Amino acid sequence: MKSPDGETREGRPRSLAKHSAILKAAIELLELKGIAAMTIEEVAARAGIAKTTIYRRWSSKGALAIEGFLHEMSTKMYYDNSPSVIADLKSQLKRVAETFRSPTGRVVAGLIAEAQRDPETMKAFVDGYVLRRRQTTRQLFQRGIEIGEFRPGINLDMAIDLFYAPMYYRLLMNLGVYAPEDIESYVDIVAAGLNATGKQLTAPTRQAARRAG
Amino acid sequence: MKSPDGETREGRPRSLAKHSAILKAAIELLELKGIAAMTIEEVAARAGIAKTTIYRRWSSKGALAIEGFLHEMSTKMYYDNSPSVIADLKSQLKRVAETFRSPTGRVVAGLIAEAQRDPETMKAFVDGYVLRRRQTTRQLFQRGIEIGEFRPGINLDMAIDLFYAPMYYRLLMNLGVYAPEDIESYVDIVAAGLNATGKQLTAPTRQAARRAG
Amino acid sequence: MKSPDGETREGRPRSLAKHSAILKAAIELLELKGIAAMTIEEVAARAGIAKTTIYRRWSSKGALAIEGFLHEMSTKMYYDNSPSVIADLKSQLKRVAETFRSPTGRVVAGLIAEAQRDPETMKAFVDGYVLRRRQTTRQLFQRGIEIGEFRPGINLDMAIDLFYAPMYYRLLMNLGVYAPEDIESYVDIVAAGLNATGKQLTAPTRQAARRAG
Amino acid sequence: MKSPDGETREGRPRSLAKHSAILKAAIELLELKGIAAMTIEEVAARAGIAKTTIYRRWSSKGALAIEGFLHEMSTKMYYDNSPSVIADLKSQLKRVAETFRSPTGRVVAGLIAEAQRDPETMKAFVDGYVLRRRQTTRQLFQRGIEIGEFRPGINLDMAIDLFYAPMYYRLLMNLGVYAPEDIESYVDIVAAGLNATGKQLTAPTRQAARRAG
DNA sequence: CTGTAAACGAGACGGTACGTCCCGTCTTTTT
DNA sequence: AAAAAGACGGGACGTACCGTCTCGTTTACAG
């Protein structure tokens, strides 16, 4: 959005209906052919509005796509609220995997790709999606510490990286999205690693450390 | 590449000199302005050859870029051969991080982005870069098992994902590449997790280590 | 021309200035190097406008060339209005010959050639040039009948063919354009033939000759 | 043809079979899609020979097309040898008209068009077709004078123009080829005109008419 | 029967222009 | 002023052929 103008403005106000129509058309095209093949011109045609009306509101194809995507994703990707944070994480990751396997997976990959070529899109994507989600996840992990599932000293940011990176890595490298049982096991591995490692490295690791030294 | 024909072909053979000139120009532009801004036309102009000569050999900008990139990277990114596989992994990851912080980081991100929009580029990228590297890493980890640094039962593919995904994730999400000390700690975490986890999740870390030993 | 729309159209109207600039450039190139060597790209460059602006208005090189040519020729090639239609015809044909001997001759030949390879150009040429001129000539000949220089029953279309075809024939066959005295004599021949021939080949010829004298 | 070399040459002689194969392919394409759409590359492909083999023999598409066309036309377009030259002329013109109405008409128009854009093609066309035919026609008309159907003083070249130009004119201007009865009448008109006109426009007409009758 | 010179097939190559697709900006009229 | 419609300059696309070139292979004739 170009003018997040709080105050009242002169002249004819921007139509909210147009706004929705544009987003709707954008989402459709996004799922239909991906962001690479989506053009502002086609969005305009499909929404039945003028190109200028889009340019007045969004500075780039990416920004529009991101907004459309977030609009669509907004309600999904919640965490359950069970007694176990690890369980909540697993079930959420399985839902993510499911989404990545669906056409939406290609959309996400496309958005990440688009972000690499346009700084504005990157900003919109990171601020609107990545950081927002990480914030939510950080709260989840905080609760994990409180209920004793995670060791108090762990680096939360790194934890988020370790739990989520594999999902995106495999999506983008075209290696196939993890099956639910793989998710189970890798979450267990990372969780174990996080909890095992701090001051206490006790017995097992020691040998390796000695050799490496 | 269109015709990776080992045998003698009919007609005038393709000039190797042109081939190199094109790759050279492509690499230069890749580092100069990224794959998104790189155009076949400019590559041709810079290489001093005709556009058609490029199209005769590469079917897309991505395929050309990938070949140029691999040509450039071919010698880099080796593993040391110290007594400790973990140590080798860490030092290599630190080199990767260094590369990702340099302009080459943007190049890699750009290639991954390009791969999302063009299947041929994806194939070239996955086959020529991703899988090839994973193969090397798999051998490293195999050695890790042999010398007792990794538990014999671990899923090697998953291990590769866990060790490498965070690097790409942070690169592509614009979250900043890990500092060496972060790499140290996250590798320790993942290694610990891999070694800790079999069926058992509690004390057993020690048993696993014993078995692995 | 694509949209010969008399009424007001939606959106930004096409610039008349551009239109003229394009035509001017086209005419210049036409005379300079002929239609075969003229390219849309060069017309655009010379007119200082974008290639797309040309394609938006003309569907082919030929259509553009024809319009430029007609624009140029519009005022030339009139008939004098002397008491004798035959005399008017002769003087006009001499002017045509003069034109055909000049660089414009090659332009005309080129346009006819272009018309053979593109139906749209043919249509533009026939409608805009051939038929328009024939109409004018038909009126001239009508007057010729009224004043008694042509026999009332003659086939006007055939008359036009007979008087004009030799000019184009010699131009296109590279046989050299007729000299004024040749024109004099062949017009006399054709005129005599037209007046001589009906059912009757004897008597009437005399009357016609008397009147024409 | 490039080397009309009478003497024996060194090395492998040019294959006559290839020569024919090329001409055959050229003629086929000529009739199939016209000279404008015919390409040397396609001729080569269709003839199953290499492009260079064509370039070794013909300097341009036009030269090749002309040779192919003449090869095809060589036997057609003769004059009957009846007692009346006028009758022979009429029957021949009717055959020409028939040809012009057939796909060959477009081929002829295309050749004339091609000749306007390439001097070599023009030369090949004029020398190989136009002048050759005019020579034959001149002989016919000579006979016409001898048998008294044409007045002795007529300008033979002009006569040829007047009898043949309308055919080409109407072909190239897309005005429709004359029907047989039109040919009858326009030949009569021109013949009458030629015989009527010398210095004298009055009396002699009658003599000519008497002879022609 | 053999050497040689040119013909020949195949396809690389530099090059020109094509006509198209979008971009993002601008101009004009309508709401 | 927003909005609709579409003109406009512009950049690059990928393609089609051009005519030339560089190979390796074949073939007729001369010695």
Image: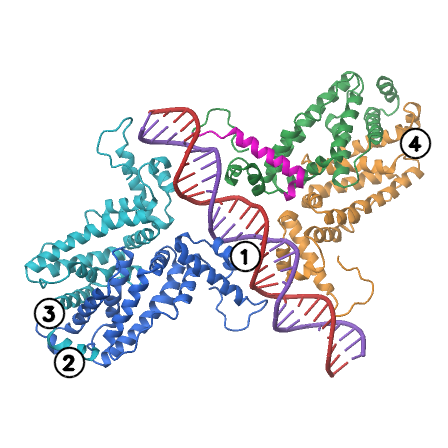
Chain colours: A cyan, B blue, C green, D orange, E red, F purple
Q: Which of the two labelled residues, at mark 2 and mark 1, occupies the earlier sequence position?
A: 1
In the rendered image, the vertical position of residue C195 relative to residue D95, given as above or below: above
* Residue at the spot of label 4: D211
Contact between labelled residues 2 and 4, with CB atoms less than 8 Å apart: no
Residue D200 in the image: state x and y as whole percent.
92, 25
Q: Are marks 2 and 1 on the same chain?
A: yes
Determine which of the numbered discs, if any, sits on residue B50 in the image.
Answer: 1
Amino acid on which the number 4 mark rests in the picture: Arg
- Tell me which chain the residue with mark 3 is part of: A
In the rendered image, the vertical position of residue A122 relative to residue A17, given as above or below: below
Q: Nearer the viewer, residue C146 or B11?
A: B11
Amino acid on which the number 1 mark rests in the picture: Ala
Secondary element at image label 2: helix
The residue depicted at 76 percent of the width and 35 percent of the height is C101
* Residue at the spot of label 2: B211
Q: Residues within 10 Å of mark 4 (few under 14, many from 20)?
A: some
- Tell me which chain the residue with mark 2 is part of: B
Residue A118 in the image: state x and y as whole percent.
34, 49
Q: How crowded is mark 1: few (under 14 residues within 10 Å), some or many (20 or more)?
A: few
- Tell me which chain the residue with mark 1 is part of: B
* Residue at the spot of label 3: A199
